[in-house]
Image (cartoon, rainbow, N blue to C red):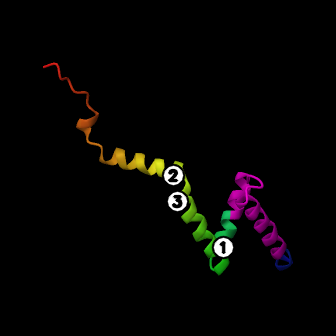
Amino acid sequence: MDGAREPKRDIVITTLLVGALTGQYELSDVDRQTVGEWMVDHADEAEVRDLLTKMVRTQISDTSEWREGVAEAIRSKFQSPAADAPTDHSV
């Protein structure tokens, strides 16, 4: 019986994913978890693997919040403690 329900589940999850990717609607946290697990479970399929690769590449390159976060992490990692201390030039 579970085998009979699996194709329907795949269709529902694929529909959720396509809807989210095309901006038709936002996924709930539960739906995001479900879609993410489904994609990981199906990552050995060429189409799913290609889609995952494109999504990650797009997320990394196109997300300004991600780039800003990385830039801030790099700045704080290499910022010298002396640069943070106020300097007194009145002497």
Residue at x 85%, y 74% (from the top left corner): 5
Amino acid type, mark 3:
Ile
The quarter of the picture where residue 19 lies is bottom right
Q: Please tell me whether mark 1 sits on a helix, a strand or a loop.
A: helix
Amino acid type, mark 1:
Asp
Q: Are marks 1 and 2 in contact (CB under 8 Å)?
A: no
Q: Is residue 1 left or right of residue 20?
A: right
Q: Are marks 2 and 3 in contact (CB under 8 Å)?
A: yes
The quadrant of the rendering that contains the N terminus is bottom right
State the CA–CA distance, disc 1 to disc 3: 22 Å
Q: Earlier in the sequence, mark 1 or mark 2?
A: 1
Q: Please tell me whether mark 3 sits on a helix, a strand or a loop.
A: helix
Give the residues drawn in magenta, as a range: 6-35
State the CA–CA distance, disc 1 to disc 2: 26 Å
State the CA–CA distance, disc 2 to disc 3: 7 Å
Q: Please tell me whether mark 2 sits on a helix, a strand or a loop.
A: helix
**Residue labelled with disc 1:** 41
Q: Is residue 77 left or right of residue 20?
A: left
Queried whether the magenta region covers residue 57, the answer comes back as: no
**Residue labelled with disc 2:** 66
Queried whether the magenta region covers residue 23, the answer comes back as: yes
| Disc 3: CA contacts within 10 A as few (<14), some (14-19) or many (>=20) | few
Residue at x 81%, y 75% (from the top left corner): 6
**Residue labelled with disc 3:** 60
